[in-house]
Amino acid sequence: MSNIIRLVWFDLKPELKPPVWIIAEWIVFLIQIGVYGVMISQLVTNPMIGDYRQFYAVGLVIMITFDMASHTGRHFVEHAHEGRLPYLLSLPISRSKLFLAIALQGGAELSLMLAVPLTVTLLIIGNLTWISVVACTLTLFWLGFGVAGFMLGLSFIAFKSSDLYTAIVTGLSTIIIRFSTVLYPFIVLPSQYASAALFSPLTYGSDLVRLILGFDPSILLNSYYAVAVLTALSVSTLGLGLVLMQRLVEGVKSA
Amino acid sequence: MSEIRVILAMARNDFSYFFRTKWLMAVLLSLNLSDMLVVALVYKRMMTFDYFAYFVPAVIIMGLFAASMDTGRRIWLALREGVIQYELSLPISTHGLVIAYLLAGGAAALVYASSLMAIALIVLPAHAIWSAFMLLPFLFVLAMGLAGIAATLAAVASTHGEFFFAFQNIVQVALLTLSTVYYPMEVLQNYLPPALITVVAANPLSLAAEALRQYTFAGAPIEPTFLVKILLASIPFTVVGAFTYLAALRNFQVKGKI
């Protein structure tokens, strides 16, 4: 276990000394919620949505989770590309432990990034309780592990071309966010977009978090589906990542 | 005369580098097209006013802004990777190098924004397409100004590695949210203090988005004073960016590092 912690700290240290990225993320969140959220909520008049700023705040938290999770996947590819992966593979730890260290590092970064945004969101909604904090955090981590596993799965494209991988992942990330219920409820989506949104894991993650925080269930997707989809995503992509890590990585050079 | 030729060659090189960066094109196109064709359409269904008509012209300006800001990334890369040492060894003066980067930044952003404009003209009826052509030179000056902001950030952040992207992110979000890109001035006036309203009104992004909405899409006659306002709001950023980057390069020539 000490090896895993050492490895996590080794990767986390550059992010914290000084924590510019984390503070920048918090500042951007506060500007978005304090200016954009307030202004745009004056324009949203659909009575079913209520205060759009609350809806938007949850969306921002989901976007941060998604960004951090996909960053974890991309980080792995960068390691491969920059030659750090062979070094990590040469360390006297098993592949599964290495995979666990990468996942834990992503989790630790996500916790730091979300500390302020999640607290502010819960304050805006008026639901800052231990139960809501724990339930939201668990859901966000579940979603984060699923997305990170998905990106790790995709990272094997990078062994063909890292440039192509970055183009696919960054383009796909935007599409996954836009075609989901992160920024708008499912009921207002045009039918063509609604069917695409059903394929986005963020749709289920954001609707589940909103349900936990007491949003009107009539504007959200069925929570049972949401739990099932998030569980399936996390288990399958993390499992796939673990298998690929153990069998394919060794000896493979990134393009 | 030969100096101008070298400046143009440098600018052309940097210009083509922008369009050859696959991931950047993927990000910009997916972001701007989904804003235009998904976000604007869906938001319209949640509002009582025509947000699609309001937001589509703004997406062109957002694209111009994002593409201009990439100049900073290219400058930062040149400083980090040592390419700048090669560029300084070329038969070009230091200020020529600065001009080349700003020209390339402005031109790349303008070409990219023009492609977005072509798509916008398909999805949203325009009443005066010719005025879009009239606005292009002013959008180019604006793009140079925004490239100047990016150059300033790159020069300031060059000693702190990846912090450049964090600074860029904050500046980008602040400039966009404190503008009329996303929401009309009337909404802002109800909530922001007068000092910030002045900032919003003078923000070149607000001016450019308003010019596109009024002159190209609504078909109002072009007011020369409004165009002068765009120039006045953009040129200071170009000048500050050019001098900051120039100072950074001079420092680099003396010390061998920034």
Image (spheres, coloured by chain):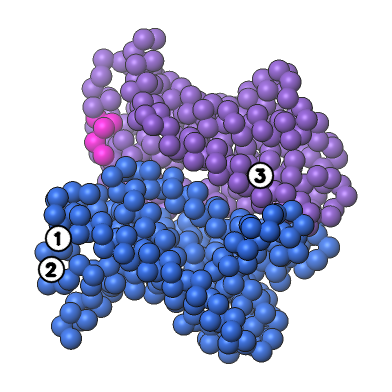
Residue most extreme to the right: A47
Q: Chain of mark 3?
A: A
* C-beta proximity under 8 Å, tags 1 and 2: yes
Can residue A87 be seen by looking at this rendering? Answer: yes
Q: Which chain is blue?
A: B
Q: Position of residue B181 (x, y in %)?
A: 63, 64
Secondary structure under tag 1 reads helix
Secondary structure under tag 3 reads helix
Report the residue marked by disc 2. B90
Residue A50 in magenta stretch: no
Determine which of the numbered discs, if any, sits on residue B32 in the image: none
Q: Which chain is purple?
A: A
Residue extent of the magenta highlight: A82-86
Q: Position of residue A132 (x, y in %)?
A: 72, 23
Main structural element of the magenta stretch: helix, strand or loop? helix
Residue at figure coordinates x 66%, y 51% from the top left = A36
Report the residue marked by disc 3. A33
